[in-house]
Amino acid sequence: TIMQRLSYTHAETFVVEAADSRGTGSSSSSGRLLAALYAARIASEDEARSEICVGNGGSVMQIIALSADPEGQGAGALLRDFVLQFARLDSTVHSVVGITRCEGWRASTASLEDYVAQ
């Protein structure tokens, strides 16, 4: 499960918060959480397929989970794009992997690529 994977790894957490009434969105503010992404560094892309991931700080960044408030108006996509750009700029990251559960894709008329991008 996601909780097990997070407990075995040294997960990195990225968040998007709504600005508070003062117009700030800093971690010390009372802004509302709009999206959170959990990632871990693993040794190889094959390790992403394993049920137990040790997260040893390898050169592959695995996106473990992304959760977004539907009322966040694109906060999840914004966060995903930020993390991918962050990984691109980090010279120690060789690749980024993620495993998704596309529960609604078969009922959708979108291509898999379009469905995942939503």
Image (spheres, rainbow, N blue to C red):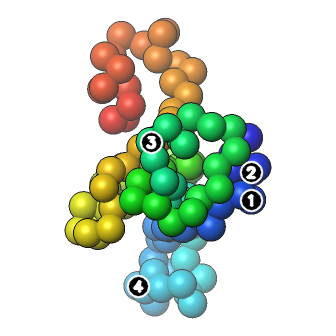
Is the residue under label 2 in contact with that under label 3 (CB below 8 Å)? no
Task: Tell me the CA gap for discs 4 and 1.
Answer: 34 Å
> Residue 3, labelled with which disc?
2
* Foreground label between 4 and 2: 2
Name the spot of residue 81 as percent of width and height, x first.
31, 55
- Is 111 on the left or on the right of 27, as rendered? left
Find numbered disc 4 in the image and state the secondary structure of the residue it sits on.
Answer: loop
Identify the residue position indicated by label 4 in the image: 23
Between 41 and 107, the one lying in front of the other is: 41
Find numbered disc 2 in the image and state the secondary structure of the residue it sits on.
Answer: helix
Q: Residue at x 56, y 34 (%)?
A: 49
Q: Quadrant of the C terminus?
A: top left
N-terminal label among 4 and 3: 4
Circle 2: residue type: Met
Identify the residue position indicated by label 3 in the image: 45
Circle 4: residue type: Gly
